[in-house]
Image (cartoon, grey):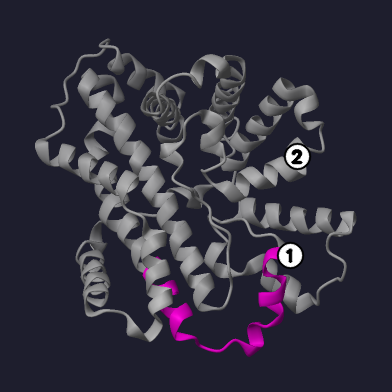
Amino acid sequence: MFDFFANAVLPAGISFFTFQLSSFAIDRYRGQVQEAPTLMIFAAYISFFPQLIAGPIVRYHEIKESLGNIGACRWDVARLSKGISLICFGLGLKVLLADTLSSAMTQFVATPDSLSPVSAIYVIFSYSFQIYFDFYGYSLIAIGLGTIFGFTFPSNFARPYEALNIRDFWRRWHMTLSYWIRDYVYVPIGGNQHYIRNILIVFLLCGLWHGAGWTFLAWGLYHGLLVVGYHWTAAWWDRMPALAQRGFTFILVSMGWSLFLFDFYGAFDLMRSLVGFSTAEIPPPSPEMWLYLVVSAITCFVVRPENWSSVVSREGTKVSLLVTVAFAGLMVLVIVFLDRTQGFIYFRF
């Protein structure tokens, strides 16, 4: 049964093509798109390259004006500075953090049944930060490229690992997907009138959107059950200290990512290692590997790339020497470590 999806061959970016085409068709049917675009404008909307493979998911009305003015776009120093700064940050998050964490985890991922509980904890949280920086980095690059060409793409992240609960997490993580599912699936099938049923439906759909595989469906069901569980326990959960709420939410989300990293058997082996039922043959993470994790945590919870890019766009041609040197240094580091880079995780979705 688990091999049902094994030989499925899907075009690159099929999820984003489908979602953007569907949103346009539904908005046109609802009358929210009053005037049909020309074939060229429509083709540009569907295939605009920066965000096509991994988002953010853009609706036609959000970039209609920019599409119409694309031929008259002129270079603007402030816009160019902001776009380049976002691309620099995105590349830094991807190459220096996500790919570094991935390289460090190689031996652990290959043998999830041979880990100590400490190593299993390292894998869970390391992959959690890896997928965050991998996807967040791509989104920043896409938004930066769009900015350079005169497009304003919606934000896709709002500090998701600082969420107080799982419902709050989904208002912060891959926001354009969450809003798309809310507006085009959840509300039309009844919304809160049949809350539990509809939540499970939309999260199963969310899992299937991420990939044609049983582990993705299981991941969607896992998050659906977490949202339903929070719905039932909100009165108790919300009384906990904010730090505890954030901590438990982060742990639950991180545990779920194991279904992206492994198949069912690998995920089960990882959970067995986590509770001590393994041979623990692999040496524990080195101090250097823990340092990677600490740096990732600090970057995730402290650094605000959006604030830096806003400063750059406001300063325009008067960007300070310090900021210029900082971005130049970041790009030098990216180039130095470029040989370790890997494909974006969300490219397979």
- Magenta segment, which residues? 61-86
For discs 1 and 2, the disc positioned in front in the rendered view: 1
Can residue 327 be seen from the camera position used here?
yes
Q: Main secondary structure of the magenta part?
A: helix
Tell me where residue 247 appears, x and y as whole percent.
Answer: 37, 27
Front in this rendered view, residue 137 or 336: 137
* Viewer-nearest residue: 261 or 287: 287
Mark seen at residue 334: none
Task: Say which residue appears at 23% left-offset and 40% top-offset.
Answer: 293
Find the distance from the CA under tag 1 to the CA under tag 2.
19 Å
Q: Amino acid at mark 1?
A: His
Contact between labelled residues 2 and 1, with CB atoms less than 8 Å apart: no
Residue 330 lies in the magenta stretch: no
Q: Which residue is mark 2?
A: 185
Res. 209 image quadrant = top right
Left/right placement of residue 77 relative to residue 234 reads left
Quarter location, residue 181: top right
The answer to whether residue 249 is above or below residue 140 is above
Q: Earlier in the sequence, mark 1 or mark 2?
A: 1
Task: Say which residue appears at 83% left-offset and 64% top-offset.
Answer: 33
User: What is the count of numbered marks?
Assistant: 2
Q: Secondary structure at mark 2?
A: helix
Is residue 66 within the magenta segment? yes
Amino acid type, residue under disc 2 in the picture: Val
- Horizontal relation, residue 1 to residue 67: left or right: left
Label 1 sits on a secondary structure element that is helix
**Disc number for residue 61:** 1
Q: Nearer the viewer, residue 285 or 139?
A: 139
